[in-house]
Image: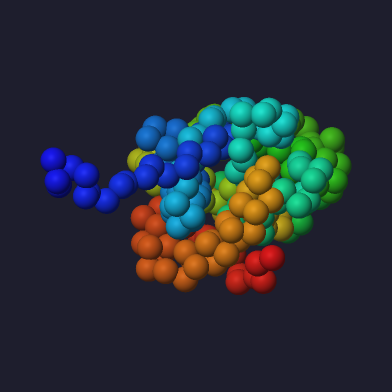
Amino acid sequence: MYLLFTMPTVTAKEALDIVVGLERPPYIIEENAQGFELELVNAVLNRLDKAANYLFVPFGRSEKMLMNDSIDGMTTTNAYMISNKEQLTNPYVIYQNVAISLSENNLSIEQIQDLGNYSIATFEEAHKVLGEEFTQAIERSPMYTQVVDRLSQLELLFRNRVDVIVMDINIFNYFYAINKTHFNEQAFEVHDIFPKMHYQMAFKDLKLVSDFNHAYQEFIQSTEFSKLQSKYKMLLAEIPEQNAP
């Protein structure tokens, strides 16, 4: 009985309900809430003695869900999606969209407007995030389609159903590494024509915004972060150090 009453009290971490887009490995893997981005957020929140309860929803619905009283935050957002800028953290993850074509086709793609000469398959809602120049290019494209399944994009490219696919380079590398024998290891060209996309977290609790910024800066300087980068073979994974408010 004495031991029972003198044992230290273990308090559970505060759980936050956080909205996340649908699966896009290696960033987000729904099974067991894995992936580079989710594990990064987990590690940062852990430093704040908090834990994430992820709610996976289609892209485009997450902004509206943040207004729900039961939701505490959301991932992979920015000032174009969130009207209250005070709810946004500093950028914590980089996405790098690229255009990819087959080497054998020898396509000339040096800038975004060049895409208008070719058939294109992109990810869902790409026209909303890739800018006005991209929107003008797809209007001139002989065929443009948006695909929910990222692997289907690779199928379209390597089966010569489209000339070009547009997707994040880490997502492409992830799916190609798993399926390259299926695609007969065909050579491809990566056209780096899009700017990097820096994404932020959004929290209703403004103090949590500041706390997340500070904890993030600590985390990316740790060996834990280096191991996470290596685990998922991430390119462009680190955001330059910022002055966290």
Q: Is residue 65 visible?
A: no
User: Residue 137: horizontal and vertical position, in percent?
Assistant: 82, 43
Front residue of 35/86: it is 86
Q: Is residue 5 visible?
A: yes
Q: Quadrant of the N terminus?
A: top left
Between 207 and 139, the residue placed more toward the observer is: 207
Drawn side of residue 11 relative to residue 61, left or right: left
Image: 165 above or below 216: above
Count the marks: 0
Q: What's the residue at 69%, 51% (across, down)? A: 206
In this rendering, position of residue 241 left or right of residue 136: left
> x, y percentage for residue 189?
57, 54
User: Which residue corresponds to the image point at 43% horizontal and 62% vertical from the top-left?
Assistant: 225
The image quadrant where one finds the C terminus is: bottom right
| Residue ID at (52%, 62%) | 215
Identify the coloring. Answer: rainbow
Give the quadrant of residue 214: bottom right
The answer to which quarter of the image holds residue 160 is top right
Query: Is residue 195 positioned above or below 180 on the image?
Result: below
Percent x, y of residue 142: 78, 32
Residue 72 horizontal side relative to residue 225, left or right: right
Q: Measured from the top left, where is residue 18 in percent x and y?
A: 56, 37
Query: Between residues 75 and 11, which one lies in front from this camera angle?
Result: 11
Q: Looking at the picture, does residue 135 appear above or below residue 43?
A: above
Examine the rendered structure and indicate whether residue 197 appears above or below residue 128: below
Query: In the image shown, does 53 or 36 lie closer to the viewer?
Result: 53
The residue at the far front in this view is 2
